[in-house]
């Protein structure tokens, strides 16, 4: 790699690429276990995100147990309930937990609307991912394909943004994101999505490429939404749970948004989005 190209990309390009590959490999291994193991992984992630969401909404990277507990329990419970009894059970727990959290927030003089928003947005995305993975026929292939597409989006957007630069995508929300980065992310996701036909042949390379591009836009939208949320409260990272990488929400915001969009498409098509 030439010196100029290396300077544009930055010294951490290799680390980013390796991190993305490792993330895909670890997630695929965990998801391959299936069943309750996948649901438990989602529940743990949900509890962590609930704790982070409450901390950010309080303007810091930590939140006390009392204010976080209802949201953490609602998100973790929704993931487990979706696996055990379907998405309607997950939604029921989200409503219950969100309502309890709102009641406690009012009693403590806090703005209850942020807790309800967290339960709704994060909970719906978690339930969507668990539901997609839970399909006995295509769940594993769908989950691995989805994670690969989101990882490609992140790497493609970052590399294109560094190499090309240009006009900013949303400077008031995320100053480093560019339109070139968006295009790079969409392109990378379309390529990886199309290659998914190697293990999802019934989806067709062209169709999977289109879905990959669509989910890339959703993933970047999720990233921007989380950035706007953090900027609203003056917080840089959702937490410091992952040293050097911020919080769980910082790592899976795009995956959560893409999961929700893919689940909605799958439900609208009668369970056959990728087939």
Image (cartoon, rainbow, N blue to C red):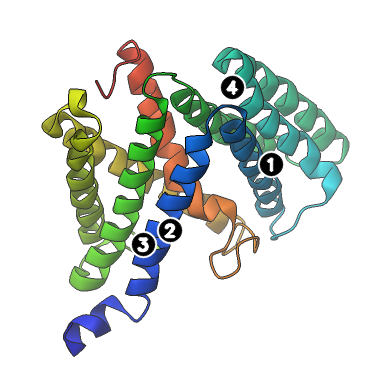
Q: Which residue is mark 2?
A: 22
Image position of 11 with respect to 124: above or below: below
Vertical side of 152 occupied by 197: above or below: above
The circle drawn on residue 171 is 3
Residue linked to disc 1: 47
The count of marks equals: 4
Nearer to us of marks 2 and 1 is 2
Mark 1 and mark 3 lie on one chain; the one further toward the N terminus is: 1
**112 or 120: nearer the eye?**
120
Asked if residue 105 shows in the view, the reply is yes
| Residue in the image at 43% along x and 58% along y | 22
Residue on which the image places disc 4: 83
Residue displayed at 53% across by 35% down:
33
SS class of the residue under badge 3? loop
- Image quadrant where residue 61 sits: bottom right
Q: Earlier in the sequence, mark 2 or mark 4?
A: 2
Helix or strand or loop: what does disc 2 sit on?
helix
- The residues bearing labels 2 and 3 have C-alpha atoms spaced at a distance of 30 Å
Rendering coords of residue 107 (x, y %)? 88, 35
- The Cα atoms of the two marked residues, 4 and 1, are separated by 16 Å
User: Of the residues tagged 2 and 4, which is closer to the observer?
Assistant: 2
Q: Where is residue 215, by image quadrant? A: top left
Distance, label 4 to label 3, CA atoms, is 39 Å
């Amino acid at each position: 790699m030439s010196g100029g190209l290396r300077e544009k990309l930055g010294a951490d390009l290799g680390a980013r690429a390796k991190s993305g590959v490792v993330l895909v490999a670890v997630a695929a291994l965990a998801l391959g276990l299936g069943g309750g193991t996948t649901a438990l992984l989602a529940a743990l992630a949900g509890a962590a995100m609930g704790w982070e969401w409450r901390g950010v909404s309080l303007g810091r990277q930590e939140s006390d147990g009392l204010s976080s507990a209802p949201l953490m329990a609602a998100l973790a419970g929704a993931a487990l309930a979706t696996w055990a009894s379907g998405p309607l059970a997950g939604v029921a727990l989200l409503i219950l937990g969100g309502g309890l959290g709102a009641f406690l927030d009012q009693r403590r003089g806090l703005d209850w609307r942020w807790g309800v928003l967290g339960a709704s947005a994060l909970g719906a995305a978690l339930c969507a991912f668990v539901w997609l993975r839970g399909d006995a026929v295509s769940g594993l292939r769908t989950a691995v394909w989805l994670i690969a597409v989101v990882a490609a989006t992140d790497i493609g957007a970052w590399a294109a943004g560094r190499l090309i630069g240009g006009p900013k995508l949303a400077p008031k929300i995320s100053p480093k994101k560019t339109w070139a980065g968006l295009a790079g992310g969409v392109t990378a996701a379309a390529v990886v999505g199309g290659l998914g036909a190697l293990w999802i042949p019934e989806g067709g390379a062209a169709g999977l490429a289109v879905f990959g591009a669509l989910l890339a836009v959703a993933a970047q939208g999720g990233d921007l939404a989380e950035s706007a949320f953090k900027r609203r409260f003056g917080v840089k990272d959702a937490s410091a749970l992952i040293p050097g990488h911020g919080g769980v929400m910082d790592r899976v915001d795009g995956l959560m948004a893409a999961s929700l969009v893919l689940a909605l498409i799958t439900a609208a098509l009668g369970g056959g989005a990728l087939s």
